[in-house]
Amino acid sequence: MNTKILARLGEQLKFLRKDKGYTQEELAEKVGVHQTYIGKIESGKSNISTMMLFKLSRALGVNLSKIFEFDK
């Protein structure tokens, strides 16, 4: 597992969350997980599923591709 990719993905999700004005707790509530899980994702410590990526994109109101724009 490439931890650099997970870290960059987490940073992008954190940026998008803050851009929407959500706390970790608010975003967690929207996707139905505990806020510590959002923290693990944002810190790059959790390899999340495709379904969770989809749920996060919906909760953040962005296209799934926007989450992966960290690589540009």
Image: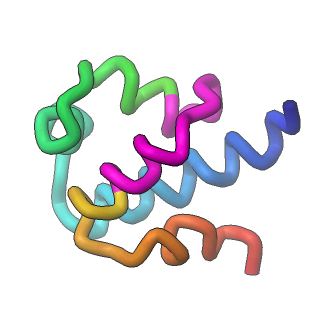
User: In the displayed image of the protein, which residue is found farthest to the right?
Assistant: 2
Coloring scheme used: rainbow
Find out whether residue 42 is within the magenta segment. yes
Residue stretch in magenta:
41-56
Image point (63%, 31%), residue name: 47
Q: Nearer the viewer, residue 11 or 31?
A: 31
Q: Is residue 21 above or below residue 45?
A: below
Residue 68 percent location from the top left of the image:
61, 68
Number of marks drawn: 0
Residue 19 percent location from the top left of the image:
29, 68
Q: Which part of the image, by quadrant, shows the N terminus?
A: top right
| Figure quadrant of residue 39 | top left
Image point (22%, 34%), residue name: 28
Judged left or right of residue 45, residue 25 is: left
Find out whether residue 60 is within the magenta segment. no
Residue 38 percent location from the top left of the image:
37, 32
Q: Is residue 72 above or below residue 61?
A: below
Q: Is residue 62 above or below residue 36?
A: below
Image point (31%, 50%), residue name: 55
User: In the displayed image of the protein, which residue is found farthest to the front?
Assistant: 51
Image point (46%, 50%), residue name: 53
Q: Which part of the image, by quadrant, shows the C terminus?
A: bottom right
Judged left or right of residue 60, residue 5 is: right
Judged left or right of residue 3, residue 24 is: left
Judged left or right of residue 26, residue 19 is: right
Q: Is residue 18 above or below residue 65?
A: above
